[in-house]
Image (cartoon, helix red, strand yellow):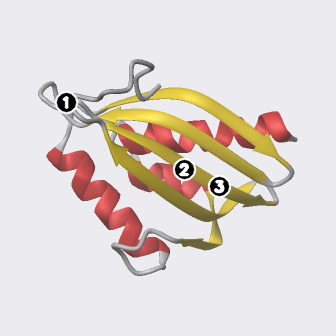
Amino acid sequence: MINSIKEKAVSFLKMVAAGDVREAYQRFTSPDFRHHNPFFRGDPESLMLAMEEDANQNPHKVLDIKQVIGEGDMVAVHSHVVQNKDDLGIALVHIFRFHNDLIVELWDVGQQIPENSPNENGAF
């Protein structure tokens, strides 16, 4: 089961990044879906609309999955998202909770990649 929900979490993010936001929601989210992004209401519609707007504004977005971790009904996806060719990107972690193989809850945290970081290991 873990591999199945890990694949679904990754597919959801890839579809959203590619601009197929509504299809991703239809295929992978539960009617009971809720999220914890502090910039939007907690309902599915507000986040979906924000994702669509972002996809329209950044049609060349690149999502590079770095790690996928699953345990029980939870999946965490660590990725590098670059909005356009001039962007250093954001290190993102999306945490999904699944029920009956559908996403019922989503958390996301992000960190801008600084131009001059003292860390010799890099963000990834």
Answer with mark 2 or mark 1, whichever residue precedes in sequence.
Answer: 2
Q: Nearer the viewer, mark 3 or mark 1?
A: 1
| Image point (28%, 35%), residue name | 89
Q: Position of residue 2 (x, y in %)?
A: 83, 40
Q: Which residue occupies the extreme top position in the image?
A: 120
Residue where numbered disc 3 is placed: 96
Q: Secondary structure at mark 1?
A: loop
Q: Who is closer to the viewer here, 32 or 111? A: 111
74 with respect to 78 (left or right)? right
| Image point (74%, 43%), residue name | 5
Q: Nearer the viewer, mark 2 or mark 1?
A: 1
**Residue type, label 1:** Glu
| Image point (41%, 45%), residue name | 16
**Residue type, label 3:** Phe
- Distance, label 2 to label 3, CA atoms, is 6 Å
Residue where numbered disc 2 is placed: 94
Q: Which residue occupies the extreme left position in the image?
A: 86
Residue where numbered disc 1 is placed: 115
Pointers 3 and 1 in contact (CB under 8 A)? no
For the N terminus, the image quarter is: top right
